Image: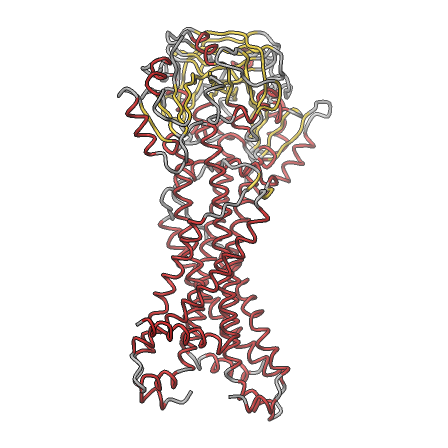
């Protein structure tokens, strides 16, 4: 058996190069196809990962816990049933990578010139390390120091719209749990720059204790955010956090908190497969054509082999082997080429000319292609599998030749 | 090319029916895909632009220079109602209406949220915006300056109010003073656009003006033209109608919503890559077929050359074969492509999981591809050209064929 395989493979290899022009053309076609599949997939992956990262950063956190009413009524009335201290007692020592509690309420910020509706987020900057984008996005002034910090950090876009700047005072208005309007003057401590206007306009940060004091909810929070190790695998983390918290707490992964990004990731996975199959079909006609021609040219030879006692299965194997070798060479070259194209683009592709459009997608203005081993394996696997299937009919026909007829047929 | 050459080419094509059919299938497959995808794009872009603009933006807006970037209450169009009337008369369009814009805290009995308030002309606003037609509860604003407000659906839900309930506005007025007022909810609109439903409220222009001390000033005069292609013409006509003294500008939808065209450009860019790859793969297929068919006829071509037929003429026959092959693929692809597209055009095309994505571009979950001359011919036309280019090398090879050597070829 093993010897037969070696002979078949060697025959297939030699047959391929009998008509080197044809083989070279087909290898080029497969190479272009494989390159297109992998390169395009790397670009799309890069874009989606960027979106997911931005999305998770603006939530932020891989898993969040809320009062079950919070998503419908994201206000100070939907506090977590457990206070800050209780949550800390429950989560400490559970081995979580990072977690933080926040106060997250709708509010209005007014300068002397303008007023804007925003989300006021009270944070503990020490707990947010690694969780929130804020520390890395600081552009002006200073970052928040600790939970007692009562400075306000605003997006640059919002600072411009309010016509205010670091060091000036603004007024924040919101409501307490009894729906009394509460307000307080804050000094602008810093400005952050995320590149996404939507984030910069919508979010305003201050120390958690300052926010709690303003709202009259000392020791209470609206949100718990937990960071996992990998955003692609958070289900275990969800279960772990759920087990640690009281039953009346809603614990959700990021892809349910932000349905858009969750949907994007799924659609992209499906799209990668569709793209591979479409390219394969476009290629398959050429591959099958090549096989049909190769078999046609060798009709007499195949007849002779059969007459000399080679089994039909040997012929079948040889033809399929020929097609798979062809595809494998093309796939290897295409993957190498894709890798060589992606490598110099590692630093990112500047797509700022369509930045506002990409913002509609939720993506930034630089595209970082991401060549995933998983996608390469998928592409190679799908193409080889379908290639095998596509080359079966011609191979089958060749193996069914009647030796005498085939021998006497004029080429 | 003579009739004889054509007949020869046709017969040559069918010497290997299987090969020809496979090559045809490759061409037709790409063409069907191209027709369908381009039709889908054409339909989607139009819809995306219309849906995005009709909610609030309109086709053109007159604004104070700088308002677009800064959104300051003080950057106004003085006497907005009068300018809107002038533009209506001057442009001969009914769909012109002024708006004033401010941000404020809205408080109901139970909740408080910040929102963007639009002071609109109750009579004219339905002509420039789709929101008045999308009321889910209650009614549209009454003509005049009554103290009433229409809220987006998510905003109404967050505030826990329904038509008839009272809402308090708190903000700062144009002159820097404190703006406060109590108003009644008249209706609730549901546009399906998250940002609008969550953050927009509309109130009568005159009432807005009293509350925010606008003294008749507006922030935008919205113009909707009969069709997108008329926008440039109306833009310069509107510019000519502006009062010379005021610091006003006319902005078109591309400036007002720059993301829209760029999103389309980004999409066209990636689609172009897909198309190019398809076309190149087809070209390889045709190149392979034609090269094979020329190589296996080396002997025959040698005899032809020896008999005195010029290489050019032989090359013409080879090119004609390709043209026939490409032409058949073109016809087949266009017919099948149009059929597939027409079917989806009636039934609609949906991709699982697409709803959330589509919604962020103001698109419905089901797409209806649009057939037109361009979408049917553009892709197949390019494929045809590449089919001919692919046959160039096999055809040119004939020129350096040695008759004697060729005749001896196996």
Q: Which quarter shows the C terminus of chain A? A: bottom left
Residue in the image at 54% along x and 85% along y = B298
Residue A160 x/y as whole percent? 62, 21
Taking depth in this image into account, of B296 and A314 the one nearest to the observer is: A314
- State which quadrant residue B168 falls in: top left
Compared across the picture, whether A313 is left or right of B368 comes to left
Q: Residue furthest front?
A: A3
Query: What colouring style does the render use?
Result: secondary structure
Residue in the image at 37% along x and 70% along y = A320
Residue A344 vertical placement versus B61 (above, below): below
Residue B346 vertical placement versus B82 (above, below): below
Residue A94 x/y as whole percent? 34, 24
- State which quadrant residue B164 falls in: top left
Residue B285 vertical placement versus A107 (above, below): below
Q: Residue furthest left?
A: A247
Taking depth in this image into account, of B115 and A124 the one nearest to the observer is: A124
Q: Which quarter shows the N terminus of chain A? A: bottom left
Compared across the picture, whether B275 is left or right of A390 comes to right
Residue in the image at 59% along x and 77% along y = B395
User: How many numbered callouts?
Assistant: 0
Residue B254 vertical placement versus B20 (above, below): above
Residue B219 x/y as whole percent? 60, 22
Residue A158 x/y as whole percent? 57, 21
Q: Residue furthest bottom?
A: B307
Taking depth in this image into account, of A301 and A211 the one nearest to the observer is: A301
């Amino acid at each position: 058996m093993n010897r037969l395989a070696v002979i078949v493979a060697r025959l297939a290899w030699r047959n391929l190069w009998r008509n080197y022009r044809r083989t070279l053309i087909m290898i080029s076609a497969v190479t272009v196809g494989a390159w297109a599949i992998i390169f395009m997939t790397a670009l799309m992956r890069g874009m989606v990962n960027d979106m997911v990262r931005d999305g998770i950063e603006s939530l932020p956190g891989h898993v969040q816990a809320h009062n079950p009413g919070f998503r419908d009524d994201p206000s100070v009335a939907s506090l977590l049933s457990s206070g800050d201290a209780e949550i800390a007692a429950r989560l400490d020592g559970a081995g979580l990578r990072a977690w933080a509690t926040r106060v997250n309420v709708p509010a209005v910020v007014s300068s002397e010139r303008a007023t804007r509706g925003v989300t006021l987020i009270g944070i503990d900057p020490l707990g947010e390390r690694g969780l929130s984008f804020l520390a890395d996005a600081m552009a002006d002034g200073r970052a928040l120091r600790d939970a007692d910090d009562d400075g306000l950090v605003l997006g640059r876009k919002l600072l411009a719209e309010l016509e205010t700047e670091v060091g000036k005072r603004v007024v924040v208005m919101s409501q307490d749990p009894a729906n009394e309007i509460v307000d307080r003057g804050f000094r602008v401590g810093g400005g952050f720059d995320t590149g996404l206007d939507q984030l910069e306009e919508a979010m305003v940060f201050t120390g958690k204790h300052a926010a709690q004091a303003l709202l009259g909810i000392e020791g209470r929070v609206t949100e718990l955010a937990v960071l996992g190790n990998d955003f692609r695998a958070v289900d275990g983390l969800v279960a772990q956090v759920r087990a640690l918290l009281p039953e009346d707490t809603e614990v959700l992964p990021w892809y349910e908190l932000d349905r858009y990004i969750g949907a994007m990731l799924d659609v992209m996975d499906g799209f990668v497969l569709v793209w591979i199959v479409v390219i394969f079909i476009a290629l398959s006609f050429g591959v099958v054509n090549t096989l049909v021609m190769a078999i046609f040219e060798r009709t007499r030879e195949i007849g002779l082999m059969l007459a000399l006692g080679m089994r039909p299965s040997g012929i079948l194997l040889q033809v399929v082997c020929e097609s798979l070798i062809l595809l494998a060479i093309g796939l290897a070259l295409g993957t190498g080429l894709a890798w060589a194209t992606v490598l110099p683009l590692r630093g990112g592709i500047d797509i700022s000319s369509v930045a506002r459009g990409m913002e509609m997608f939720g993506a930034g203005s630089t595209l970082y292609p991401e060549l995933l081993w998983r996608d390469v394996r998928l592409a190679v696997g799908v193409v080889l599998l379908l290639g095998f299937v596509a080359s079966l009919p011609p191979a089958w026909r060749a193996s069914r030749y009647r030796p005498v007829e085939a021998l006497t047929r004029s080429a | 090319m003579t009739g004889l050459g054509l007949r020869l080419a046709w017969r040559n094509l069918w010497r290997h029916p299987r090969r020809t059919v496979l090559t045809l299938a490759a061409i037709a497959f790409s063409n069907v895909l191209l027709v369908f995808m381009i039709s889908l794009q054409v339909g989607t872009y139009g819809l995306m632009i219309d849906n995005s603009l009709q909610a609030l933006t309109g086709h053109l807006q007159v604004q104070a220079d700088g308002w677009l970037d800064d959104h300051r209450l003080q950057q106004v169009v003085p006497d907005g109602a009068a300018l809107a009337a002038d533009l209506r008369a001057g442009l001969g369009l009914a769909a012109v209406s002024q708006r004033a814009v401010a941000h404020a805290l809205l408080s109901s009995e139970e909740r408080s949220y910040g929102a963007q308030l639009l002071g609109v002309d109750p009579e004219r606003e339905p002509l420039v915006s789709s929101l008045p037609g999308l009321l889910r509860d209650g009614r549209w604003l009454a003509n005049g300056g009554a103290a009433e407000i229409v809220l987006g659906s998510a905003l109404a839900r967050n505030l826990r109010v329904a038509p008839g309930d009272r809402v308090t506005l708190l903000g700062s007025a144009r002159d820097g003073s404190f703006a406060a007022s109590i108003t009644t909810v008249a209706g609730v609109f549901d546009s399906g656009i998250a940002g609008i439903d969550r953050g927009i409220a509309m109130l009568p222009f005159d009432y807005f003006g009293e509350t925010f001390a606008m003294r008749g000033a507006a922030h935008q005069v919205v113009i909707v033209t009969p069709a997108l292609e008329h926008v440039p013409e109306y833009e310069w006509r509107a510019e000519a109608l502006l009062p010379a003294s005021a610091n006003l500008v006319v902005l078109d939808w591309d400036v007002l919503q720059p993301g829209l065209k760029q999103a389309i450009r980004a999409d066209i860019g990636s689609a172009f890559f897909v198309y190019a790859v398809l076309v190149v793969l087809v070209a390889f297929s045709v190149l392979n077929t034609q090269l094979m068919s020329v190589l296996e006829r080396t002997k025959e071509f040698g005899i032809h050359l020896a008999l005195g037929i010029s290489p050019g003429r032989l090359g013409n026959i080879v090119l004609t074969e390709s043209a026939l092959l490409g032409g058949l693929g073109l016809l087949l692809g266009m017919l099948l492509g149009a059929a597939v597209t027409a079917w989806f055009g009636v039934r609609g095309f949906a991709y699982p999981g697409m709803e959330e994505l589509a919604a962020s571009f103001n698109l419905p979950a089901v797409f209806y591809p649009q057939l037109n001359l361009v979408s049917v011919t553009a892709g197949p036309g390019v494929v045809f050209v590449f089919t001919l280019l692919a046959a160039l090398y096999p055809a040119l090879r004939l020129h350096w064929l040695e008759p004697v050597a060729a005749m001896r070829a196996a």
